[in-house]
Amino acid sequence: MHNSSLRNSIRAAIITHQAWKDRLQMAIETGQMADTVSDMSSDNKCPFGNWLYSPKIPADIKAGKPYQVIRRLHAEFHTCVGDIAKLAMSGDQATAQQMMITDFANQSDKLQRALKKWDQELLSTPV
């Protein structure tokens, strides 16, 4: 797998994971969501998660620290998303909103920074 392909997947993940903020905010406001809480909590149900666990990524990359960090942060991000969605679906908008400000903001920021760092590392790595 070439660096450009990896970088494209990473950049797509940055964009799609930023969109979770709007999706969760809508769930908090309406108490409804298209996806199940179980699917939102799972780190292998979103397109990036599918890719992250796929055989498309070579074993040497999966063994590397950047991949391992992203995989852990991605799982933590989706656990947080699921927790907020569960609260929103149960009608506890106040707690869900507070988690958006604290937990989600923190998890999202960590994942975004790690993805951007991995992207930059791949940019400087020869093909």
Image: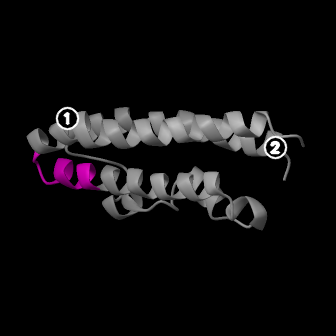
**For the point 33% across and 39% down, which residue is it?**
106
Q: Which residues are magenta?
A: 83-92
Q: Nearer the viewer, mark 1 or mark 2?
A: 2
- Report the front residue among 85 and 9: 9
Quadrant into which the C terminus falls: top right
Instruction: Give the residue at mark 2.
Output: 3
Q: Earlier in the sequence, mark 1 or mark 2?
A: 2
- Report the front residue among 127 and 74: 127
> In 3D space, how far apart are the residues under numbered discs 1 and 2 (Cα atoms)?
40 Å
Residue 54 makes an appearance in the image: yes
**For the point 86% across and 47% down, which residue is it?**
2
Percent x, y of residue 45: 51, 60
Instruction: Give SS at disc 2.
Output: helix
Which SS type dominates the magenta stretch? helix
Q: From this view, report whether residue 127 is shown above or below residue 124.
A: below
Instruction: Give SS at disc 1.
Output: helix
Percent x, y of residue 116: 59, 34
Instruction: Give the residue at mark 1.
Output: 29
Percent x, y of residue 9: 68, 43
